[in-house]
Amino acid sequence: MATQTWLYDAILYIYALSLLFFFSDFMNASLRAKRIGAGLLIFVWVLQTGYLIWRIASHLQMTAVTPFEYWLGFTWLLITISLVISRFIKIDFVVFFVNVIGFAVLALNLYSNQGGGESLAVWRTTRELLYIHISLVLCAYAALTIGALFAGMYLFLHNQLKRKRWTSFVRRLPSLELIERYGDRAVIIGVPLLAMSLAIAVTSVLVEGRASLLFDWKVVTSCATLTMYVIYVYQRARLKRPGQQLARLYMLAFGTLILNLLANSISSFH
């Protein structure tokens, strides 16, 4: 069982890393990032295929498929479809979000009864999934906060250059292009992590039968925050908005994130 858990965790983490590279390609049209993301996704598919075959072979005597194998097969199918889309149809936006759903279901599948039905095992699984959710959201908050610092720096430097104020402080700042590049890297890391953590949280609430929590202030502001960052990504990657407009939009999105953090005091979600 320990080896099985280790392998499942490895699949999850490699899957998350693959999503980060796919998002990087979506933001900056990086062929290298796309190839690494695709390579990691293929590796996930190979590991999951072997794991799924092993699960089925070890449960041949069972008369019914457990929910664990059912959802494992579902995520395997999603990954397979995304690989086909990536190879033949080449719609990267669809590939990314299909795999966000696949990752959420794969992580949520830790909740499924794997055959033991032991309360202690269920409690440990729930705790592990909570750790994954908290780890993802904390890393997302950290990356997006750094991105906000770069956005604020961009607005300040742009304003100083526009007014031709060549102070010693301005000369010490990096160029607008470099600030924008580092800000993009923060978004590339933060937004997918935020999406994955929110997907895990929402789907787990639904499975546990606590749908009323979807109207909790924390969940509502989390969805609003993710929506704001998705709008930013779309403006940045597809509409090619000027840097100053993007920096302002980023600061607005970060303001929504601050509101989300303040919602902890009035939320009953966690």
Image (cartoon, grey):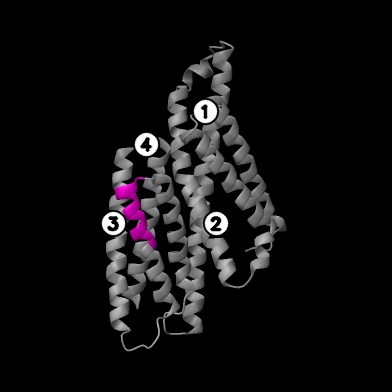
Q: Earlier in the sequence, mark 2 or mark 1?
A: 2
Judge from the rendering whether residue 263 lies leftward or rightward of residue 62; answer left or right. Answer: right
Asked where in the image residue 218 lies, by quadrant, the reply is bottom right
Which residue has dot 4 on it? 29
- Relative vertical location of residue 267 with respect to residue 89 in this rendering, above or below: below
Which residue has dot 1 on it? 241
- Find out whether residue 80 is within the magenta segment: yes
Identify which amino acid the numbered label 1 is placed on: Arg
Which residue has dot 3 on it? 42
> Given this view, does label 2 or label 3 mark the residue nearer the observer?
3
Q: How far apart are labels 4 and 2 at the CA level? A: 25 Å
Q: How far apart are labels 3 and 4 at the CA level? A: 20 Å
Q: Answer yes or no: do the residues labelled 2 and 3 have beta carbons within 8 Å? A: no
Q: Nearer the viewer, residue 54 or 153?
A: 54
Q: How far apart are labels 1 and 4 at the CA level? A: 16 Å
Identify which amino acid the numbered label 2 is placed on: Leu
Task: Give the magenta part as a residue range.
Answer: 78-90
Task: From the top left corner, tell me how far across and down residue 9 is, in percent.
Answer: 38, 65
Which residue has dot 2 on it? 198
Per the picture, the main secondary structure of the magenta-coloured stretch is helix
Q: Answer yes or no: do the residues labelled 4 and 2 have beta carbons within 8 Å? A: no
Quadrant of the frame with the C terminus: bottom right
Q: How far apart are labels 1 and 3 at the CA level? A: 34 Å
Asked where in the image residue 157 lies, by quadrant, the reply is top right
Point 57% across, 27% down: residue? 245
> Given this view, does label 2 or label 1 mark the residue nearer the observer?
1
- Find out whether residue 104 is within the magenta segment: no
